Image (cartoon, rainbow, N blue to C red):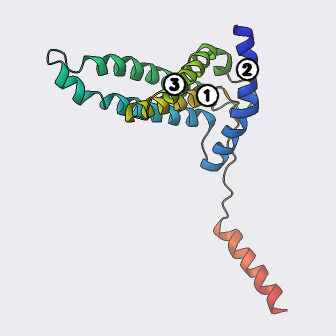
Amino acid sequence: MKEQFALLDDMLIDGLFQPIADRMAERFRLSTFQLARMFLDIAAVALILSQAAHLPGIAAADTSLPYLYPVLVLVPGLAAMTILRGEIHRTQEKHSGVLTLGANPLRPGMHWHRIVCFFWLLVMLLQTSETPPRWEGGALLAVGICSTLAVYFAACFARPLKPKKVEGQLVRAKAAVLFDRRTIR
């Protein structure tokens, strides 16, 4: 099973997520590690929103421990996302100064993370398709989508960003003088 998923995983990373990460990184001037952390932050906010919908109903139904269920879901979920975000940040810091075209260490290291997120996303898609649309279901689906995007973007090859071309005042002044000389003649 692991070998079959590894083939699918490599195909998804190389064929789908790497081109998307390259386009998004180029457009928004973010590295793939920054994209992964951004999507983890979005997933954390969506997880909080998904559990906020449970609070009023639980408080009315059970007065002894009204917030136990949301806390049991939120604390481990947010802790896992924080740990994963820290690991991505440490990897970026460790490999940011290196301009070699080496392999991303998170690609083999986060294989099990991608398996869990991929299958969790499939379950969330099936669950959402079978139930009527609700706020917490949509928020949990957003958690699944954003966390899956985060672990796949973290596994993508991190290309160094190209610096923006900034013209200095001297270059612009020289170009203006050359333009004036051509138009005067």
Q: Earlier in the sequence, mark 1 or mark 3?
A: 3
Q: Nearer the viewer, mark 1 or mark 3?
A: 3
Q: Which residue is mark 1?
A: 154
Q: Position of residue 57 (x, y in %)?
A: 23, 27
Q: Residue furthest bottom?
A: 185
Element type at mark 3: helix
Q: Residue at x 61, y 47 (%)?
A: 29
Amino acid at circle 1: Ala
- In the displayed structure image, the side of residue 145 where residue 162 appears, left or right: right
**Label 1 to label 3, Cα distance in Å?**
22 Å
Q: Earlier in the sequence, mark 3 or mark 2?
A: 2
Occupied quadrant, residue 63: top left
- Quadrant of image for the C terminus: bottom right
Residue contact between numbered discs 3 and 2, judged by CB atoms under 8 Å: no
Residue contact between numbered discs 1 and 3, judged by CB atoms under 8 Å: no
Q: Which residue is mark 3?
A: 124
Q: Which residue is mark 2?
A: 8
Whether residue 147 is visible, yes or no, is no
Element type at mark 2: helix
Occupied quadrant, residue 177: bottom right
